[in-house]
Image (spheres, helix red, strand yellow):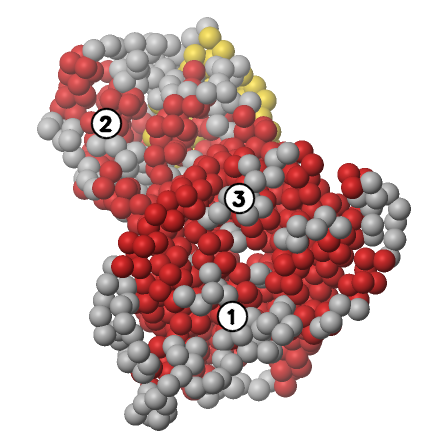
Amino acid sequence: MADQQLFLDGVSIALNGRVLLAVSHRVEVGEVLTVMGPSGSGKSTLLAYIGGFLDRAFSATGKVFSGAEELTVLPAEERHAGILFQDPLLFPHMSVGGNLLFAIPPSIKGRAARSALVQEALEGVGLAGAASRDPDTLSGGQKARVALARVLLSAPRMLLLDEPFSKLDAELRSQMRELVFAKARTSRLPVVLVTHDEADAEAAGGPVIRVGQ
Amino acid sequence: MCFMLPRLGPPLAIAVLAGPILFGLAGTILPAFGYLPALGETDFTLAHVEKLAVQPGIVMSGLISLAAGLVTTAVSLGMVMLFVAGWAGTRIFSRIQHLVSPLLSVPHAAAAFGLAFLIAPSGMIARIASPWLTGWERPPDLLIVNDPIGLSMMAGLIVKEIPFLLLIALAALPQVDLLRTRALAASLGYGRIAGFLHGVWPPLYRQMRLAVFAVVAFATSVVDVAAILGPTTPAPLAVRLVGWMNDPELSMRFFASAGALLQLCVTAAALLIWIALERLGAAMLRRLRRSGLRFRRDAWLRRAAIAAMVAVAITVLAGLAALAIWSFAGLWQFPGALPETFTAKTWMKTAPRLAAPLSVTLIVAALSTALAIALTLLCLMRENETGRIAGRRALLFLYLPLLVPQAAFLFGLQLLFVFTGGVASLPALVLAHLTFVMPYVFLSLSDPWRAYDRRYEAIAAGLGKSRSATLLRVRLPMLSRAILVAAAVGFAVSVGQYLPTVLIGAGRLETITTEAVALASGGNRRVIGVYAFLQMLLPAAGFAVATLVPALVFRNRRAMRV
């Protein structure tokens, strides 16, 4: 499902009649669109709108396409919009491997095939052998990498990043940025990054939209 | 899974909460004025009300009920207020909170029996103090339990209402900025309790108000505690009512209905007086604020508050211990502090008779709890769908079964079941219990449900998971501990229900609680010990399961611990 550009067609989000942001943009495969804005500017609502879980308090218009398919008519679970938040939000009741297995689409059948994918994904983020671990025993950086592996395993159409680096310390942050952007390029995904950190926008290297200023 | 279901949640919940009350009140009030077509009576008359008015001791019965409601509420609320004022946020507070909270699950009847076993003339306290202190060689001839003005009954209610009000206060505390208000008041030179009363108490009390009203309503109309500890000449109104209601003479229904109507009026009067007291209290607080008095030397009051709290916990726990000892007691003469011999004979002799009521207790509690959990989950899922959380009106519905005195509407409800052939049937009993289990389950589950981080659901949806898969594999497992605790609360509430079981079970469906209360007048302490101990054991077992199962299932999941 990857390899499709993301098209934001006249998307506009308002709260109580006040327009928070208006975006029209084509995000190419492997490209990162950065949405910059101070906290409280409503920039995260763009990701919620694309992903299909916008709070009812907001009103939004405009369409979102993945390739030729309109996403905005689909329920959230059929949009395949992989999202990373500030917190890794690993499911606390599952093991690390359980989190990853949960993400693998059911079309991939057979226990062996699925757990091979898990192993591969863990190796890909430098966590080989962590499948049976309790997610809560991982370090912050390790959790972030598992979250990344999880979202990539779900065969998403795009990557939505909601300030995913802001809670990491400086060194980890730049490592994680490189890892995420590299993975998005090799997986040929369009990426929308929401942040208030100029360094994120610089590292992303793509077009920047500024809101709430 | 069908996702139309959550839409049905709120209307079903309202039907469960309000339906029995509406039908029940109609079935009580109309016969009180002589209208009962099923018995061929369709002429309205005041004869039954007049007959009630000349009933000996009726005024006294009503006054005792009224006083019990007001005194119980004032004392327990006052103690909780002072305790929270003096100690909230400290280490000792959380320790005592952990000591007192489990008492909530002890059924009222078991706590009342425990207290009776402590304070009776031949009770534990007298035994421990005799003969070296009192000089008593035999139990003194004192009317302590069943005292004529109901002091021991009020004490029994107070020790049970304090854990309830404390829990309600704790649930409301996060919504008031206690620690900073305390620091601010202290910087102005106010004592801790005075600062709390001026800064924190008004908004805190506003949050607790419905629960306080529920205590007033409960204490004015309680039957089981009153039957065990209350006065007998005359008995509190609700106890006499149940006697009339159980009269096999059909024409007594009119008279009993008139009595239930009086109960409704007594509870309403108590609530009105309470509201007047609220006004008075608020006015006094305002005056005090204007005076600028600091009340800096309140250490003695704070210590008294903590001592009172500990005393409450010890009283209930010692009472339960007394129940256990009696159930295993062989020969035990006064004033021996302990039995001369211990034996399992009472348990063995009682065991065959326990099977039937025990199975009814378990089945009814399990079914009503399961239904309440399902309904609550549907309502909460509906909240997420609509994006609106239940407001004040919904809260009023939740508290409705706790605000209308049980005796006033269950009798009418029984009538409905009698004429539809449902009386003494298991489904009717489950339904009646559900009405009282539902509020507690909802109140206990709604906070953790609402506090859930919904970004987990966004992530699961982004991973391509359907809503039902997200619910079943992510949200419910993550909330499993909260759900099990809510279930344990519901189970405990059902086990403790006395009046709904007596009236809707119509004496043919007995539970451990109805059997225990029925033993009260007999006075066989060993057998009472067995029943009351078992009554306390069931909720405790429920909470043990709710704690142990998640601890075991998630033993390797650190973030799933509390």
Residue B59 in the image: x percent, y percent?
73, 72
Kindly tell me whether residue B443 is visible in this rendering: no
Q: Residue at x 29, y 22 (%)?
A: A103
Above or below for B101 versus B463? below
- How many residues crowd around disc 3 within 10 Å: few (fewer than 14), some, or many (20 or more)? few
Residue kind at label 1, given as amino acid type: Leu
- Identify the residue under disc 1: B229
Chain-order first, disc 3 or disc 1: 1
Tell me: B87 left or right of B406.
Answer: left
Residue kind at label 3, given as amino acid type: Arg
Q: CA distance from mark 2 to mark 3?
A: 51 Å
- Identify the residue under disc 3: B508
Viewer-nearest of labels 2 and 3?
Answer: 3
* Disc 1 element: helix
Residue A176 in the image: x percent, y percent?
23, 33
Above or below for B411 versus A3? below
Q: Are marks 2 and 3 on the same chain?
A: no
Displayed quadrant of residue B183 = bottom left
Q: Residue at x 77, y 63 (%)?
A: B52
Q: CA distance from mark 1 to mark 2?
A: 56 Å
Residue B185 in the image: x percent, y percent?
50, 76
Residue B409 in the image: x percent, y percent?
67, 50
Are circles 3 and 1 on residues that touch, CB within 8 Å? no
- How many residues crowd around disc 2 within 10 Å: few (fewer than 14), some, or many (20 or more)? many
Are circles 1 and 2 on residues that touch, CB within 8 Å? no
Q: Residue at x 65, y 44 (%)?
A: B414
Q: Nearer the viewer, residue B119 or B100?
A: B119
* Disc 3 element: loop
Residue kind at label 2, given as amino acid type: Gly
* Disc 2 element: helix
- Identify the residue under disc 2: A98
